[in-house]
Image (tube, rainbow, N blue to C red):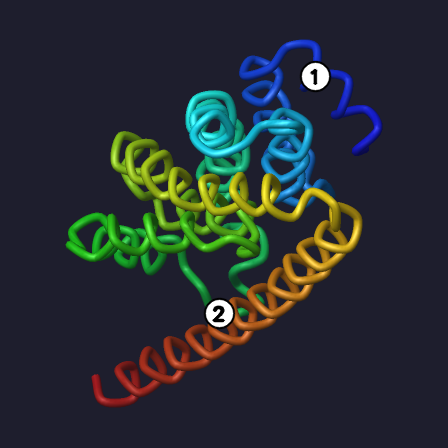
Amino acid sequence: MISQIEPFVQAYGALGVFLASVLEEIIAPIPSTLVVFSSAVLLTQGLQGWDAIIVILLKIMLPASAGITVGSLFPYFLARIGEKVAVEKFGKYLGLKWSTIEAMQKRVEKASSVEVAIFVTRAIPGLPSLAVSMFCGLARVPFRKYVLWSFLGCLPRNLILGLAGWLGGTQYGAVMEMLSATESGMLVIIVAVCVSLLIGWAIFEHKRRKKKQTVS
């Protein structure tokens, strides 16, 4: 994958970074740090000081943030459109109803901390971008709010990765292996936590409804 990205980024510069970032979000197996870090290594070779920083800002941070935001719309809408079908088909096994999901979604839409949560999770390097996009889709975070805060959160993340690529270019392979392993581990942890919370919530809702029926 790196061997395919390198000539593309070298040939098209900022446009290549944007398109590769879009693709990175759609193809889940690609680590979300791959394009930005490798692009920084390639595009800042031989540059020093402000010359390197300007390239990182204009040719890496901005186009990568835009590309990640655009590409993340695919898993966002996939989760948003497909969730009702999944709940109606499999929710009965977990004691879930679509009305319960809708109530949760309304609380998320009104929560004032949603913007902060999106920004922070997008800004952390190594946190799987796919998990953030899927969650926002499932929670039905309003489209405009999702796009704006996803883009803003990607800016510091991509700046950090861009600077890391520039400063750590000689250790390119080792750093990429570390980032990939970190992201894979984080994804496993997030999935495990989400499944546990979902099962716990389903058990709680089942007991609450059963108790309510007994009282009535």
Q: Which residue is mark 1?
A: 10
- Amino acid type at circle 1 is Gln
* Real-space Cα separation, disc 1 to disc 2, in angstroms: 44 Å
On the rendered image, what quadrant is the N terminus found in? Answer: top right
Residue 26 disc label: none
Q: How many marks?
A: 2
Q: Nearer the viewer, residue 118 or 55?
A: 55
Horizontal side of residue 95 vs 39, given as left or right: left
| Residue at figure coordinates x 60%, y 33% from the top left | 40
Horizontal side of residue 168 vs 172, given as left or right: left
| Category of crowding for the residue at label 2, using alpha-carbon neighbours closer than 10 angstroms: few (below 14), some (14–19), many (at least 20) | some
Q: Nearer the viewer, residue 158 or 139?
A: 158
Mark 1 lies on a secondary structure that is helix
The label nearer to you, 1 versus 2, is: 1
Residue 139 percent location from the top left of the image: 36, 50
Q: Nearer the viewer, residue 161 or 31?
A: 161
- Amino acid type at circle 2 is Leu
On the rendered image, what quadrant is the C terminus found in? Answer: bottom left
Residue 198 disc label: 2
| Category of crowding for the residue at label 1, using alpha-carbon neighbours closer than 10 angstroms: few (below 14), some (14–19), many (at least 20) | some
Mark 2 lies on a secondary structure that is helix
Quarter-of-image position of residue 5: top right
Where 66 sits versus 153, above or below? above
| Residue at figure coordinates x 67%, y 40% from the top left | 34
